[in-house]
Image (spheres, rainbow, N blue to C red):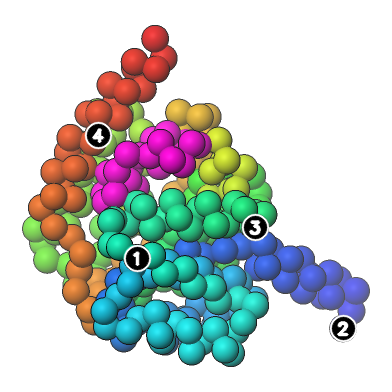
Amino acid sequence: MCISMRLIFLLLHHFMSQTLIIIPTYNEIYNISPLLKEIFSVLPDVHILFVDDSSPDGTADIIATFQVTYPKQIFLEVRQEKDGLGKAYIHGFQWALARDYENIFEMDADLSHPATALPQMIAALEKGIDVIVGSRYLSGVNVVNWPIMRILLSIGASIYVRLITGLPIKDATAGFVGYKATALSKLDLSDLSFVGYAFQIEMKFKLWKKACTLKEIPIVFVNRQKGVSKMNSSIIWEAIYGVIYLKFESIYKRK
């Protein structure tokens, strides 16, 4: 192997070993195997943390079997109660920061987020971006197999967020996001308020207010084929009121 190729290999290995993908799970037993296959096909050395909310379908048991094959790359934290996506991610962020990961990602377990976008997203973080967002709406509407009302709700939510907060992101509720650890360290994770759509908005908004650089790249989002969506009306209402709360909170703190 020539020196330049060896250097590239060593750099890629370093970036992957310093990158953690956090994947919350609840009843995702049928998606774990294809998800890991997809991720490792593009990032063979990356580290993955599953945060499972005591799934009754045996999701954690399936993850544990993969840990035997990938003991230094796959990690599992099992929480005793299901208290929201936001809490699961906060748990994962704290775990990652305590272990000095440099790049920390959010990713869904349902195969809706394309693993093929991860190298480009990691490259953006390595070039100095603080927050990289896999965006469904940066270049049109790139959503596959969603009901039209779900699409309109999601697009409307992002427009609503921009109007109220000024956040310069077209997909404010996106859940496929990468962060530099230095950016996450600027937040008081224990002070985050929300658990669903509003959690994703809150993260982006508060980091933007901390003068972090945010960038979007286009992805194609594919609706889950197996398992059941966790979306419900309480998550939607949380987002509606949460955006107003975030805006007024930022004004109050500035004063």
Q: Residue at x 77, y 74 (%)?
A: 9
Residue at the spot x=33%, y=72% of the render? 54
Report if the CB atoms under discs 2 and 1 are less than 8 Å apart: no
Q: Residues within 10 Å of mark 1 (few under 14, many from 20)?
A: few
Residue 111 in percent (x, y) is at 35, 75
Label 4 residue SS: helix
What residue would you read off at disc 1? 80
- Residue at screen point 48% across, 84% down: 64
How much space separates mark 4 and mark 2, taking CA atoms? 53 Å
Residue identifier under label 2: 1
Mark 2–mark 1 distance (CA, rounded to whole Å) = 49 Å
Q: CA distance from mark 3 to mark 2?
A: 32 Å
Q: Earlier in the sequence, mark 4 or mark 1?
A: 1
Look at 29% across and 25% down and name the residue there.
247
Q: Position of residue 28 (x, y in %)?
A: 31, 78
**Three-letter amino acid code of the residue under disc 2:** Met
Q: Is residue 150 visible?
A: yes
As helix, strand or loop, the secondary structure at mark 1 comes to: loop
Q: Nearer the viewer, mark 3 or mark 2?
A: 3
Q: Is residue 226 left or right of residue 38?
A: left
